[in-house]
Image (cartoon, rainbow, N blue to C red):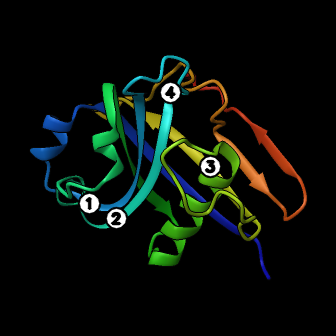
């Protein structure tokens, strides 16, 4: 099986109200914040995908977004490479992030190693300008799983 490479542009941080005013979708999303009664909670709570609009996905009353009761932060991810991505690319990117990070609210993909894949994440502010500082300490800009070993690292952002 060939190794897959997926490049994602993450934009945020958004509130739920801001996402509900947007018309885009068909991508990945990352939810961070705190759950009720969980003082020592990890910040990243859930990775997901949708082929619908983000606001439609989050309107489901059973969606895990409703379990995050404090400091909700939403990051929206757009697959940049491959250009003509398919659902399998979204599912693979989601599986890699869930398997590596093990977020509290994800129940699927946690115990199962994904196919060999390299994810390259570029992080942006809502206005599209690049984020200079790392967003989450252990969520690396480059995550590569060869089926046996992880290779991770962060990219430097600077202007000429």
The tag earlier along the polypeptide, 3 or 4, is: 4
The tag earlier along the polypeptide, 2 or 3, is: 2
Asked whether the viewer can see residue 86, the reply is no
- Distance between the Cα atoms at labels 3 and 1? 20 Å
Alpha-carbon neighbours of circle 1 within 10 Å: few (<14), some, or many (≥20)?
Answer: many
Q: Are marks 1 and 4 in contact (CB under 8 Å)?
A: no
Spot occupied by residue 25 in the image (x, y as percentages of width and height):
26, 60
Q: Quadrant of residue 5?
A: bottom right
Q: Residue furthest right?
A: 148
Q: Are marks 2 and 1 in contact (CB under 8 Å)?
A: yes
Disc 3 designates what residue? 120
Disc 1 designates what residue? 25
Query: Which quadrant is home to the N terminus?
Result: bottom right
Viewer-side residue, 62 vs 122: 62
**SS assignment at label 2:** strand
**SS assignment at label 1:** strand
Disc 4 designates what residue? 43
Alpha-carbon neighbours of circle 3 within 10 Å: few (<14), some, or many (≥20)?
Answer: many
Judged left or right of residue 102, residue 81 is: left
Viewer-side residue, 102 vs 149: 102
The tag earlier along the polypeptide, 1 or 4, is: 1
- Distance between the Cα atoms at labels 1 and 4? 23 Å
Query: In the drawing, what numbered circle is on residue 50?
Result: 2
């Amino acid at each position: 099986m060939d190794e897959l490479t997926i490049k994602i542009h993450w934009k945020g941080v958004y509130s739920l109200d801001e996402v509900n005013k947007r018309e885009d979708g068909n991508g990945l999303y990352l939810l961070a914040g705190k759950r009720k009664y969980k003082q020592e909670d990890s910040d990243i709570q859930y990775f997901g995908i949708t082929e619908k609009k983000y606001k439609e996905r989050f309107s489901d009353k059973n969606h895990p977004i409703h379990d995050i009761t404090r400091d909700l932060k939403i990051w929206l991810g757009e697959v940049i490479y491959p250009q003509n991505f398919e659902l399998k690319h979204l599912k693979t990117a989601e599986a890699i992030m869930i398997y590596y990070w093990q977020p509290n609210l994800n129940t699927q993909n946690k115990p199962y190693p994904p196919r060999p894949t390299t994810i390259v994440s570029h992080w942006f502010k809502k206005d599209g300008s690049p984020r200079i500082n790392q967003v989450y300490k252990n969520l690396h800009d480059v995550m590569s799983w060869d089926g046996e070993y992880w290779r991770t690292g962060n990219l430097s952002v600077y202007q000429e």
